[in-house]
Amino acid sequence: MWIGPSAGPILAGPSDARIYVANPLEAKSPYAAPYIPPYPGLLQPPAEPGPDGHFDHIGPGAPAFLATHSYACTRRVLDICESYLGRSIVWFFQPTLERLEIVPRIPHWQNAQSGFGFLELGESEEHGLASCFALNFDAVAHEMGHLILLSELGILESDGSRCDFFAYHEAIADFISLLGLLHFDTALDRLLRRTGGNLLLHNELDKFAELSDEKQVRSLNNSLRIGDVSREVHDRSKPFAAGLFDCLIEVYQSLLFERGLSDIDPRRFSDLRQQMAPALIEEALHGSPASYELMHFAAKAALQEARDIIGQALIRSWTYLDPDSLTFETAALAFLEAASRGRGISYLDQLDDCMRWRGIL
C-alpha cells in the first residue's frame, strides 16, 4: 500500500505528524469516558522503517504487522478524502489532542470503535478462530469515515433525536469504505474481471465488507427505500448508502455508453439498476471473458472516474450541512448541489432520480 506525500516523514511506530500507533504490551480496555489518549501503559516496540524509509519488509507473520497494516489503511483513507476536498482535514479533537492514536489490537474484544482522538480495533472470533480487525480494510475505513465526518461536519449540540445525524454517519462510513476499496488496482481488477464489467447485477461489491467468504457485514446492493426501514440507525442508513451506490453505478454505466463500451443508455431509466429487468441486462451485456478482456482497461478507467465524481460530490457536500438539522433529504440535496458545482453536473438528473427512487427526495 502506497501512502501519499502529504503524510510527510513516516517514522517508527508507524507514526507521522497526524497519526501514531500505540501497541499496548498488555491487553487494555477499550476507551470510554472520561478516558482519552494518550495510552499511559507500556507499549510494544514500534515498527521500524527499513533503510529506504518503507515498511514493506514487515511481513504478515511479523509482530509489527498489525501496527503497520492498521496505520497504512488509516492514512490511505485520510489521503483519499483530503484529495477530494483539496485540502487537509483538521481533526475534530484538536487542539486538545494533535494526533490520532491507533490501537491495533484489543484481544477478545469483538468490536472496533473510534472517538475523541482514537481508533481501536478488536477481533472477530468465528468458529474458534480469531481474525483481527486491523487486517480488515473495511473495518478500519469504516471507523475512519466516522472520524473524518466528525471533523468536517462537526458535532451535535442536541441529542440527535429529531435528525438523521447518526444514521447518516453509518451510511457515510460504509460508503467511504467502498470508495477506499475502489482505490486499489487489485480490487478493481478482481471486481471487473469477475463480473465481466457488469456491475448492474449481483456482484462482489455487495460483499466488500465481508470478514470471510460467507459472511457479509454490510451490503450496499439492496432495493430498500426509506419507507422500508426502521428508525434504528444502522437499518435507517441503508437506503441512503445504497442510493449513493446506485449513483456510482449510474455514472459508471453512463461513461461506458458514452465511450461506446455498452449499448445500455442509463438516461432511458429513472434508476437503471432497479428498473431494467435482469434478463435484459444480461442479454445486453453478455459477452465472453475474452471479449471483456479487450475492454478491461477502458472499463476500469470508467469506474475510476465514476468513483471520483461521486466521491468528490459526497465529501464536498458536507459544507452545506448542519449536524443538528441534518436529514437524509437535506443530505441528498447537498450532494446534488456539490455535484452541480463539479464533474457531476453532466449526470445531475440521473443522481436526482436515484435518490428519488429510494424515497429520499
Image: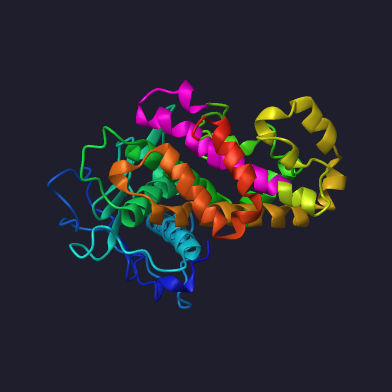
Q: Position of residue 102 (x, y in %)?
A: 31, 55
Does residue 92 appear in this view?
yes
Position of 1 compared to 48: left or right?
right
Q: Where is residue 313 in the image (x, y as percent from the top left)?
A: 52, 54
- Image point 27% across, 64% down: which residue? 99
- Image point 28% across, 43% down: which residue? 324
Q: Observer-nearest residue: 175 or 68? A: 175
Residue 95: say if magenta.
Answer: no
Position of 149 compared to 183: left or right?
left
In which quarter of the view is residue 330 placed?
A: top left
Q: Give the range drawn in magenta.
A: 225-253
Does residue 184 appear in this view?
no
Farthest residue toward the bottom? 51
Residue 251: say if magenta.
Answer: yes
Position of 236 compared to 162: left or right?
right
Q: Observer-nearest residue: 9 or 83? A: 83
Position of 211 compared to 185: left or right?
left
Please tell me whether residue 72 is drawn above or below residue 245 in the rendered image. below
Q: Main secondary structure of the magenta part?
A: helix
- Image point 70% across, 57% down: which residue? 301
Q: Position of residue 175 (x, y in %)?
A: 49, 44
Farthest residue toward the left? 34
Please tell me whether residue 242 is drawn above or below residue 176 in the rendered image. above
Please tell me whether residue 212 is drawn above or below residue 63 in the rendered image. above
- Image point 59% across, 44% down: which residue? 351
Q: Position of residue 18 (x, y in %)?
A: 32, 66
